[in-house]
Image (cartoon, grey):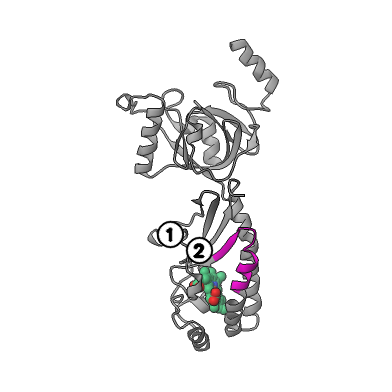
Amino acid sequence: MQLSTLALLALCALACGPVGPFPGGRLGGAPGPDDVRSWEFAEDEDQIQVETRPEDPHSVNTWFVGLGSDLYVPTSMILGPKDPSERSWVAHVLADPEVRIRVGDLVYERIATRVEDPDEYAAARRALEQRYDLDPAERDASREVWIFRMDPRPARGVALLAPFKKELQTALREGMAQGIPEAITACRVRAPEIARTHSQDGVRVGRTSHRLRNPANAPPAWVAPLLAAYVADPSARAAKTVTIDDGRAGYVEPIVAQGLCLACHGSALAPEVSARIGELYPDDQAVGFASGDLRGLFWVEYPTARGR
Ligand code: HEC
């Protein structure tokens, strides 16, 4: 066993996955979908492989547990260094959270997010202990165990939103070059047009806000709770990828007010600007913002591998 492991390692020369406790290189396998609704199918696997450090791939075998659409990977629970950051894969993840994981035959591109929420941590830890038959009463208090959630990478959402954001920006800049009241009209006409142009082939993009100017920009049902969560925690600025339903995923990104926006969304609007906005948007709630405030969200929904 020992010999054949060494022989395999020599053959692989870090060009393939880990063997037992020996780390490997880049993981081979067909790409898995971005969005996984349930990891139940992986229940029979004892371990999965996690590849870290994209610039020089390093892969290891690890324990894991799936809870619904979330996949959790712990740092050493019984063996190895007691300080998680001493494990090389953990140090890599802290430096760059982009990982690839292999579950069965498929390789999934993911972002490793350390679980900080105590309830979520407790649930994941309990599930891990159950899965690997560990007695919580025998936990070694001197061993710190971190748990990472392997979230879908937002790459798809970022890529789908990029052209929409860029065109909006151009339209605003072109409008502003003619004066603010003209830019208001440009926003009113161009913004919905641009959103329509980029909503094709099952993809829909838009902008929304908790304080709307145009009621037509109200959030879709799946965006509303995400928006409420950002409003409740004004320091939360990370983008989020979510499952909408079987076959569709969504991605949202906070929009932060900047100096340029305040001419039309700030607290001291020029009288002619105020007048034009009042005419076009009698129920306007989108004023009184300061630079750095959450102004709203960009959102995009798209079919996942399963839905295509
Ligand atoms: C020239 C005036 C003007 C400027 C400057 C401006 N906006 Fe707007 N904004 C508008 C108008 C008008 C609408 C409504 C467009 C529509 O009818 O869909 C709007 C709508 C929005 C919406 C959609 C949600 C809603 O309330 O209807 C967001 C989000 C938004 N603006 C963010 C920004 C940000 C961020 C900036 C700065 C980068 C900015 N705006 C700069 C005039 C402006």
Instruction: Point out the quarter of the image occupied by ligand 1.
Output: bottom right
Task: Examine the rendered structure and indicate whether residue 34 appears above or below residue 9.
Answer: below
Say if residue 96 shows up in the picture.
Answer: no
Residue nearest the viewer, comparing 14 with 212: 212
In the image, taking residue 178 as reference, residue 49 lies left or right, namely: left
**Earlier-in-chain disc, 2 versus 1:** 1
- Percent across and percent down for residue 98 are 57, 42
Image: magenta residue range: 191-206
- The residue under label 2 is 297
Q: Residue at x 51, y 44 (%)?
A: 151
Q: Quadrant of residue 289?
A: bottom left
Disc 1 crowd, CA 10 A, few/some/many (<14, 14-19, 20+): some
The circle drawn on residue 230 is: 1
- Percent across and percent down for residue 21 are 54, 21
Ligand 1 within 8 Å of the CB at mark 1: no
How many angstroms separate mark 2 from mark 1 (CA)?
A: 9 Å
Residue nearest the viewer, comparing 43 with 273: 43
Q: Residue at x 38, y 29 (%)?
A: 129
